[in-house]
Amino acid sequence: MQPANLLFIISDQHQAAAMGCAGHPLVQTPNLDRLAAGGTRFSNAYTNCPICVPARASLATGQYVHRIGNWDNGFPYDGGVPNWGHRLKAAGRRVDSIGKLHFRSAEDDNGFTEEIEPLHVVDGIGDPASGIRDGSVKRDWRPGIIEAGPRDSTYQQYDIRNRDNAIRWLQEHQNDETPWALFLSFVTPHPPWFAPPETYERYPHEAIQLPPQWEQSGWPRRPTYDHMRRFFSCEQSFDEATIRRLHATYYGICTFLDQQIGLVMTALDELNLRGSTRVIYTSDHGEHLGARGIYGKFTMYEEACAIPFIMSGPDVPAGKVLHTPISLVDCHPTVLEALGCPRAEADESLPGESLWRIAAADSQDRTVFSEYHAVGSPSAYYMLRDRRYKYIYHVAGPPQLFDLDADPHEVDDLALQPDASAQRLLAEYEAKLRAILDPEAVDRQAKADQERKIASLGGREAVVKRGAFVNSPVPGEAFESAD
């Protein structure tokens, strides 16, 4: 594989199903659809942790969260664990970032040659209150859901600047002789739930299909999810009109995001860079949108942990949909190979594989892993996903098992069936999980680290007084507590 430029585009909280190329009957994403038509789309791509800071730390380092200790949004990546950016810089490549990183600070060596208008965690601290996991501190998400609709937001304005900064960057580097990497990170469709009026109006409410198990009578009743609904003040269901308006808003934001990506791709074409540039598009995690009575990310259901993933450019098969399971830790070897950066001895211990080689092959079976130790959850849970089954292990409750071939909406939990075949599968997947980690020991370690972090910031009362927030402010925007 010959070295080439790499444009790595990532969004925030983009549900894998919310693209036309993924088969969604309503969501309009013509630019992502064209990118997929000219490249390879991975239908079974997953985050390694369905919340921002840990997911982005895993993407950067190629390591699982339990290995690097970025447990929640109060443990931002600080450059201490080497990432693919450090490797590229050491190899003499230019590697710049534009937009959201959600690391600790621009003062750290985060692996980039330059960070252009980066969004990092608040005050270099982030959200340490998310480490208070006993349920005693709650958050009320109902107002944000109820207020969803057509309106401007600082996130939209920020992504327009990210778009313009990317186009300007491409113009400045169109004649570079050495291949470069540009990490372009949009913050939409992450809340707030405000969409441009023009894109919001594209989605008539009556045409919107309601999500799986949205009605309270159909909610899966597990300790994990009951706790989460209480924590976010969503233990009472929203009416159908509110959920339809929320979906119309989210779809409108997805279309807005697609428009920004389209303008960047147009610039790539106009600058004659498409033939010498590989493009990756993905997101850090998904969004529930009321499925299972849950809003936000946080779980191992498809709505939250599945992510879009598209690759295009030199050496990438065109018009291909690949069903091999992949995850964000695969990005580390993928980025390095794209720019011709040789493997190092330390890479042998990393769990990921280069996606260029996987894309060149037929769909195959593979198992990917995800974990969660953060806000809204009293204890850890973990996921294993192969081509057919998804296994979810809850430290604080019984496991779940879904046959996604037969049950793509995850409404038939095989773990509830007493037959021998289901119980055998549960035992097999638990053994696979324990070959990766000790789930209870890792849960204890996460909680101990979170307690130490809170103590280092003055204790529980000081952390609670500081407040929490739903949306990290963009550069230049004041931090406003949600409490």
Image (spheres, rainbow, N blue to C red):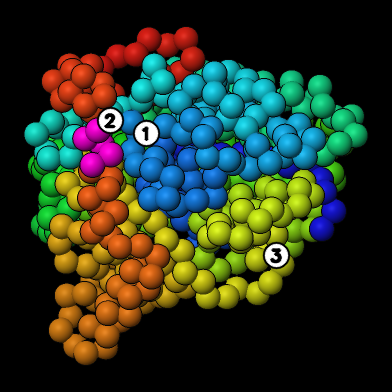
Label 2: few (<14), some (14–19) or many (≥20) C-alpha neighbours in 10 Å: many
Across and down, in percent, residue 201 comes to: 43, 32
Check disc 3 and report its element: helix, strand or loop: helix
Q: Which residues are magenta?
A: 448-452
Asked whether 325 or 159 is in front, the reply is 325
- Sequence order check, earlier mark of 1 and 3: 1
Q: Mark 3 highlights which residue?
A: 357
Would residue 323 be found to the left or right of residue 418 on screen? Answer: right
Residue 459 visible? The answer is yes
State which mark lies toward you, 1 or 3: 1
> Quick check: marks 2 and 3 in contact, CB under 8 Å?
no
Asked whether 103 or 408 is in front, the reply is 103
Whether residue 172 appears in magenta in the rendering, the answer is: no
Q: Mark 2 highlights which residue?
A: 453
Q: Mark 1 highlights which residue?
A: 75
Across and down, in percent, residue 85 comes to: 65, 37
> Quick check: marks 1 and 2 in contact, CB under 8 Å?
yes
Whether residue 451 appears in magenta in the rendering, the answer is: yes
Q: Which residue type carries mark 3?
A: Arg
Tell me what residue is drawn at x 27 percent, y 85 percent. Answer: 424
Q: Residues under labels 1 and 3: Cα distance? A: 33 Å
Across and down, in percent, residue 376 comes to: 21, 41
- Quadrant for residue 269, please give it: top right
Q: From the viewer's perspective, is residue 364 above or below residue 463? A: below
Would residue 3 be found to the left or right of residue 367 on screen? Answer: right
State which mark lies toward you, 1 or 2: 2
Rendered image: mark on residue 360: none
Label 1: few (<14), some (14–19) or many (≥20) C-alpha neighbours in 10 Å: many
